[in-house]
Image (cartoon, rainbow, N blue to C red):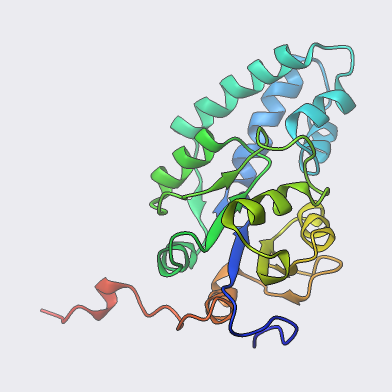
């Protein structure tokens, strides 16, 4: 069901969060931040709790204010780049066919990660190369500020009212809402406060996202259509 507040004759755009929405990287993120926290003598659980809600530079300011941010970021980048090469993560079910069904220029990624790392994960998980990524380096204010999602809309030439945000995290949901966009939540057992619609999984949301974009639902994978021996 489409959002009745959005005119049906205008182009629609879909803006995706990445980690936790398209790619399951929770275990990897926790391990990276655990290793980083132990290196600085910090409590890994406390650091990870902050890192889930903020960009890295903001995390450093909260948990290690006496450390040089550049030093902290270099150490984190080394760990994350190693994770991209050797980590164990996967695309959520439904993500490959969804992204391939959306026309180029109609979708973008809005992430607190960095673009080169996201592209590496996409290659490793078989997801199509994203045309546009608004990453941590692209904006001065991260989620929950509306700036990241508004930046993505501007780069796509989209009216925020015509954009659907797909998120799993409270900070991302607040960011999309503050940008004046339609926000759907996925991959959480309970709805995140404020979402317009909630889906237990990305797979469940796929046909509805395609309908929002004015596209037919994705069919079964090509191998499922191949005739048997």
- Left or right? Give the position of 46 relative to 217: right
Q: Toward the viewer: 86 or 133?
A: 133
Q: From where the camera sits, is residue 3 visible?
A: yes
Q: Toward the viewer: 1 or 187?
A: 1
Task: Please determine whether, in this image, residue 173 is positioned above or below residue 84.
Answer: below
In percent of the image, x 65 and y 23: which residue is there? 76
In percent of the image, x 40 and y 64: which residue is there? 100
In percent of the image, x 81 and y 30: which residue is there? 59
Task: Please determine whether, in this image, residue 42 is positioned above or below residue 15.
Answer: above
- Left or right? Give the position of 5 relative to 10: right
Please, which residue is most extreme toward the left here? Answer: 229
- Left or right? Give the position of 194 relative to 113: right
Q: Toward the viewer: 206 or 131?
A: 131
Name the image quarter holding residue 112: top right
Name the image quarter holding residue 158: bottom right
Task: Please determine whether, in this image, residue 6 is positioned above or below residue 80.
Answer: below
Q: Residue 208, position in %: x, y?
A: 58, 80
Name the image quarter holding residue 66: top right
Q: Quadrant of the N terminus?
A: bottom right
Q: Residue 127, position in %: x, y?
A: 42, 53
Q: From where the camera sits, is residue 20 visible?
A: no
Task: Please determine whether, in this image, residue 69 is positioned above or below residue 88.
Answer: above
Q: Toward the viewer: 132 or 91?
A: 132
In percent of the image, x 49 and y 63: which residue is there? 95
Q: Residue 162, position in %: x, y?
A: 67, 71
């Amino acid at each position: 069901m489409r959002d009745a507040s959005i005119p049906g004759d205008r182009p629609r755009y879909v803006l995706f969060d990445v980690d936790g929405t398209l790619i399951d990287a929770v275990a990897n993120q926790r391990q990276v931040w655990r290793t980083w926290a132990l290196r600085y003598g910090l409590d890994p659980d406390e650091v990870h709790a902050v890192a889930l809600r903020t960009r890295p530079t903001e995390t450093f300011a909260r948990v290690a204010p006496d450390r040089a941010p550049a030093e902290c970021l270099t150490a984190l980048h080394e760990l994350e780049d190693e994770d991209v090469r050797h980590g164990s993560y996967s695309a959520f079910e439904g993500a490959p066919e969804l992204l391939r069904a959306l026309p180029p220029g109609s979708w973008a990624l809005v992430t607190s990660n960095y673009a080169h790392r996201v592209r590496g994960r996409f290659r490793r998980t078989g997801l199509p190369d994203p045309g546009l990524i608004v990453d941590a380096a692209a904006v001065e204010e991260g989620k929950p500020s509306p700036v990241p999602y508004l930046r993505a809309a501007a780069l796509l030439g989209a009216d925020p009212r015509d954009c659907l945000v797909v998120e799993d995290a409270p900070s991302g949901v607040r960011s999309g809402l503050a940008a004046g966009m339609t926000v759907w939540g996925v991959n959480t057992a309970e709805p995140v406060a404020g979402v317009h619609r909630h889906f237990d999984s990305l797979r469940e949301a796929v046909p509805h996202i395609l309908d929002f974009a004015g596209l037919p639902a994705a069919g079964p994978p090509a191998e499922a259509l191949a005739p048997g021996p």
